Amino acid sequence: MRVRNISNAKELLKEYTYYIENPSLSKGNWKAYFKNHNPIHIEIGMGKGQFLTTLAKTYNSINYIGIEKIEELVLKSVRNLESTEISNMALIHLNALNLQDVFLKGEVKRIYLNFSDPWPKARHEKRRLTHSNFLKMYRNILSEDGEIHLKTDSLDLFEFSLEEINREGFYLSEIIYDLYNKQDNEIAKTEYEEKFISQGKPIYKCIASINKD
């Protein structure tokens, strides 16, 4: 995703209420930040935030945290949120490698990975958000009934992810090779997703669980 550089993005972010400047201060105590005990769902690589904002508007009994490593995208998202009245969403500027600085074991019930960078070259596979190194980290922050929801337009990344998920001992409850072939039950879509659907590209989806149902 090409993003226009904003030299003072870090300072501008501090002006917005949905942005959390020091998320590590809430580690282990997110219920105090949200002022409730509702489950936490996070999206890693939220882009412009359309997917997570749609979910937050739809399900007010779930707390949503958007995580993005590009400051300019976080800034774009918080600007869009300021005109809303959502009380169950927050945004963080964070590299996914540092998730355990922000969440304790069991604090997160669901992780969304939507159209992550496929890093197609084999020498870059450790950068893929479904590499075993990341999956081990996800296991350390997910609750016992936690889940990972993955959507991608890359078949190579999808098949790589299925192998890694199996290797790490997660349980695959859903594996879909063409999500929109017959029906559309997806409440929330990313900007990329809408674009790919309009182009007729297949969307791959899987759901991985910590434990069997």
Image (cartoon, helix red, strand yellow):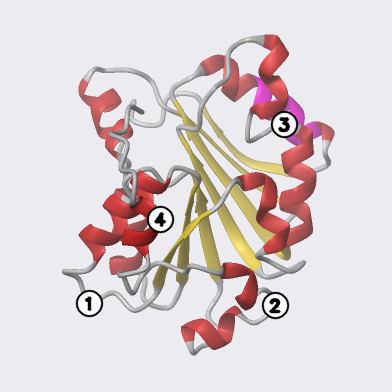
Q: Amino acid at mark 2?
A: Gly
**Could you say which quadrant of the image residue 90 lies in?**
bottom left
Q: Quadrant of the N terminus?
A: top left
At horizontal 37% and vertical 68% (from top left) the residue drawn is 14
Left or right: where 173 falls relative to 93: right
Foreground disc of the pair 3, 2:
2
Query: Counting residues from the N terminus, which is met first, the one under dot 3 or under dot 4?
Result: 4
Residue 104, image x, y percentages: 74, 69
The residue to which callout 2 is attached is: 28
Residue 39, image x, y percentages: 56, 74
Q: Residues within 10 Å of mark 2 (few under 14, many from 20)?
A: some
Foreground disc of the pair 1, 4:
4
Q: Amino acid at mark 3?
A: His
The residue to which callout 4 is attached is: 10
Q: Residues within 10 Å of mark 1 (few under 14, many from 20)?
A: few
The residue to which callout 1 is attached is: 85
Residue 60, image x, y percentages: 36, 76
- What stretch of residues is rendered in magenta? 160-166
